[in-house]
Amino acid sequence: TTIINTLTCNATINTTTLLLANLTTNSSNSNCLTIDANNVTIDCQGFYLFGSRQGGQTGIMASGYNSTTIRNCNVYNFSTGIAIMGTSSYIIFNNIELNTVADFGPSGSNGISITNTLNSTIFNNTIKNAIIGQAMTGNGISISSSENNNISFNFIRNTTGTSSGADILLSSSGNNTIHDNTIQGAGYRTISLEGGIGRNLFFNNNFSSSGSVSISSGNNSWNNSVIGNRW
């Protein structure tokens, strides 16, 4: 286990790591922490990762590694909070993403983004106060080309602008379970399903956002035969 209490951002993580201090980056197009091995846990223990409102900044990035846990991180002022690509068996829980999709963010910014990812869990995260500018795109949780993931017990508030973005976006993704999430605030879209595949299950979510629902991929279920969703 590595304990980080003196390093700044741009660190590469290849072992289980506990933070003992806040980390800050002022560099555009950079990652604060980059995961570079399998079977890694990052536990921020409530400390903050601070971005500087520059495009292309990512709080925590992982690409191509499996069986990793990211927990207890406060991620603030990045264009993307946590980005996971080409992996499986990730657990992302108890993190707080603040202002991760804001008017400084580039097109395609996300609070939490998973791409080409299998059998992972996004659980008990808070993504809030992230309102993007007009004609830009941004999402609270973005799931792309990914299957068999569980997205549950997350709190999402004000993550989209007035003309684009979704609180939860699923693109070309199937067999994912989305349950017990709370979405609040005014936004463009509460849920957006696009790009085919489908077979996603939604149940027991509290959708109190004023955003719309966009569905261009079919064969999704909006209850588990026992309980539906609250709109």
Image (cartoon, helix red, strand yellow):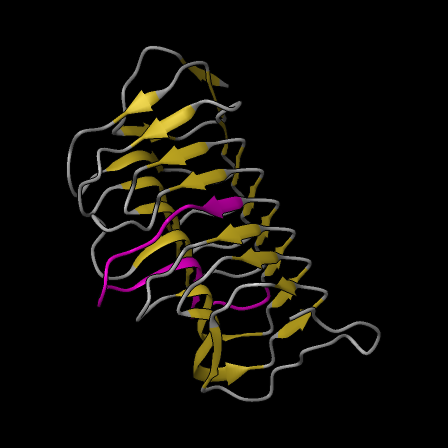
On screen, residue 57 above or below 174: above
Residue 11 in picture, x, y percent from top left: 29, 27
Q: Residue visible at 62% across and 59% down?
A: 150
> Taking 68 as reference, is 86 left or right?
left
Q: Residue visible at 29% across and 49% down?
A: 102
> Taking 223 as reference, is 188 left or right?
left
Question: In this view of the protein, which residue sits in the foreground, 195 or 223?
Answer: 223
Q: Residue furthest top?
A: 6
In reply to whether residue 25 is colored magenta, the answer given is no
Q: Quadrant of residue 113?
A: bottom left
Residue span colored magenta: 126-148
Quarter occupied by the C terminus? bottom right
Q: Residue furthest right?
A: 226
Residue 140 in picture, x, y percent from top left: 43, 56
Question: In this view of the protein, which residue sits in the foreground, 83 or 2?
Answer: 83
Q: Quadrant of residue 161?
A: bottom left
Residue 42 in picture, x, y percent from top left: 48, 30
Question: In this view of the protein, which residue sits in the foreground, 128 or 2?
Answer: 128
Q: Quadrant of residue 24?
A: top left
Residue 188 in picture, x, y percent from top left: 39, 69
Q: Residue visible at 49% across and 34% down?
A: 40
On screen, residue 96 above or below 6: below
Question: In this view of the protein, which residue sits in the foreground, 168 or 88?
Answer: 168
On screen, residue 117 above or below 215: above
Q: Residue visible at 28% across and 61% down?
A: 108
In reply to whether residue 135 is colored magenta, the answer given is yes
> Taking 137 as reference, is 128 left or right?
right
Q: Number of marks in the image?
A: 0
